[in-house]
Amino acid sequence: MEDAPSIDSTNMLISGLNVPDDDLIKGIERGIYVDSVMGAHTGNMVAGECSLNISCGYLIENGRFTGKVMDAMVAGNIYETFKNISAMGTRLEPMDAIFYSIGYSPAVLFKEISVVGK
């Protein structure tokens, strides 16, 4: 039995300004560093709509980590969100799904993204 074709992030390439990872957060007045999310499998992958629980995130104020983010989500359209990339880091980090690795990615700085929560 074969599975139906589906959309995935395999071999996705993003080009843009590369900045050392430490310099990415230095210029952020107020933002969130999202290390991991939950619920990526529940979005509408064809339309790109998603709302993801931030399972591990940190508040950035004046270019410094100042606390842990809890009870928050990022939401929006992934296709539109990826049009708002300001810069990317230079260090590749592993991206892990629940039971397996799905590749490597640099840190990505978005100009804006919708955040819901405290």
Image: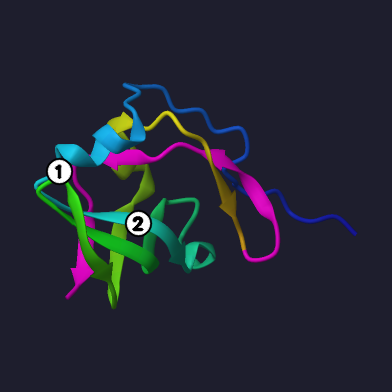
Asked if one can make out residue 84 in the rendered structure from this viewpoint, the answer is no
Q: Quadrant of the N terminus?
A: bottom right
Q: Is residue 63 above or below residue 117?
A: above
Residue 71 placement, left or right of 5: left
Highlighted range, magenta? 98-118
Residue 14, percent from left and from top: 44, 28
Q: Residues within 10 Å of mark 2 (few under 14, many from 20)?
A: some
In the image, which disc is placed on residue 34? 2
Asked if one can make out residue 81 in the rendered structure from this viewpoint, the answer is yes
Residue 52, percent from left and from top: 39, 65
Residue 45, percent from left and from top: 49, 54
In the image, which disc is placed on residue 28? 1
Magenta-span inclusion, residue 116: yes
- Secondary structure at badge 1 equals loop
Q: Mark 1 and mark 2: span between their CA atoms?
A: 14 Å
Report the residue at 49% width, 62% height from top: 40
Which amino acid, mark 1? Ile
